[in-house]
Image (cartoon, rainbow, N blue to C red):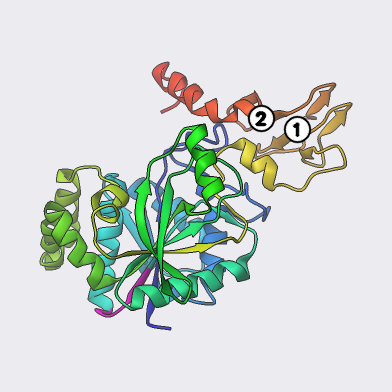
Amino acid sequence: MPTLFTVVMAGGSGTRFWPASTRKRPKQLLSIGAHRGESLIASTVRRVEPLCPAERTLIATGEHLLEATKKALPWLPDSSFLGEPVARNTAACIGWATAIVRRRAPDGVVMVLPSDHDIADEDGFRKAVEVAVRSADAGSITTLGITPTRPDIGYGYIKVGDEIGDGAFRVAKFVEKPDTLRAKEYLASKRYVWNSGMFFFKAQTMMEAIQTHMPALAEGLQRIDDAGAEEERVTRDVFEGLDSVSIDYGVMEKASSISVVPASFGWSDVGSWQSAWELADKDEKGNAADDAAVLVDANRNLVRDLRTEAGKKTLALVGVDDLCVIETDEALLIVPREKSQDVRKLVEKLRERGVID
């Protein structure tokens, strides 16, 4: 294995898992995956530690989330945390972190991971990562593609091209989120995988790609590199002047040498309370509920008491099915599981009313 660095993207606006998540407590800081008692970001870092030690791990988050993120990852040194002055999407985030890696190890390989996914088969995941790292070390920007299990319209897709060898394939093209009919066609063809948002590349390879396809970002990153003692001030100036562009649009869809490693390891992007119910342990009636909750003639519900003084009030459900019931110190949410994606719309309305920031 080459010298490997991990970059974990840990921004977020706290919309999908309200009321548990907020701007100051986005979902990666919550324990809503299969590992109850462990935040999603802690799970993310822990499962790659056999491949990449703490001293080569960078956590890219917003300045306003730095303290909460450090608290969630107490074993990492302060030097692991990068506080973005303003959010400018994944291209700026990945570019900045990659430039820092290049300073430390010009030949280093970077593994970029979202902070808020759940993975059931961690050994299978690490094996896929090793394949992707070898592909990246050979000079190709590489991504992990998830073998689809259903015609999902919530993910971007990647069309898999010719095999390169050792489990890696050329990317034929990236595809935006499809409609249901096209998603069914993709599933039947067996030539498409879900875009996982995980990327692997040599630091120098990515910096050259940014120079080619995003010259304004490359110029800003060079200014940061040259800033010396003024780095903090220059970083803020640069970020404030950048456009908000995703790495997919800015680089991945334009670069000439992109590879994908198709894999299946029980991946979930934990996109809604519905996903949290799917990942949770359930009783014989399909309920995923805290021990203090009382359910009578109720089926397939998710019940979470997330108050700081949980247990002071009994949450009871009678004769209802397929609900998410989430209580925090600030709010109570009740929503049908099939409508849990609409929590985003609710958050927008609450912000319009000034109820939340």
Q: Earlier in the sequence, mark 2 or mark 1?
A: 1
Name, please, the residue furthest toward the bottom: 1
Magenta segment: does it hold 333? no
Magenta segment: does it hold 106? yes
Residue 241 location in percent, x, y? 14, 44
Query: Is the residue 151 above or below the residue 117 in the image?
Result: above
Residue 267 location in percent, x, y? 58, 55
Tag 2 and tag 1, C-beta contact below 8 Å: yes
Indicate the secondary structure of the residue bearing disc 1.
Answer: loop
Residue 100 location in percent, x, y? 26, 68
Residue under the point 42% across and 22% down: 351
| Type of amino acid at the residue the image marks with label 2 | Arg
Residue 97 location in percent, x, y? 29, 63
**Magenta stretch, main secondary structure class:** loop
- The foreground one among 46 and 122 is 122
Q: Is residue 7 visible?
A: no
Tell me the tag on residue 337.
2
| Type of amino acid at the residue the image marks with label 1 | Asn
Please tell me in which quadrant of the rendered image residue 123 appears. Answer: bottom right
Tell me the tag on residue 48.
none
Image quarter hosting the C terminus: top left
- The foreground one among 186 and 65 is 186
Per the rendered image, the range of residues in magenta is: 105-110
Indicate the secondary structure of the residue bearing disc 2.
Answer: helix
Residue denoted by label 1: 301
Q: CA distance from mark 2 to mark 1?
A: 8 Å
- The foreground one among 30 and 129 is 129
Q: Is residue 238 visible?
A: yes
Query: Is the residue 171 above or below the residue 129 in the image?
Result: above
Q: Residues within 10 Å of mark 2 (few under 14, many from 20)?
A: many
Q: Is residue 211 left or right of residue 131?
A: left
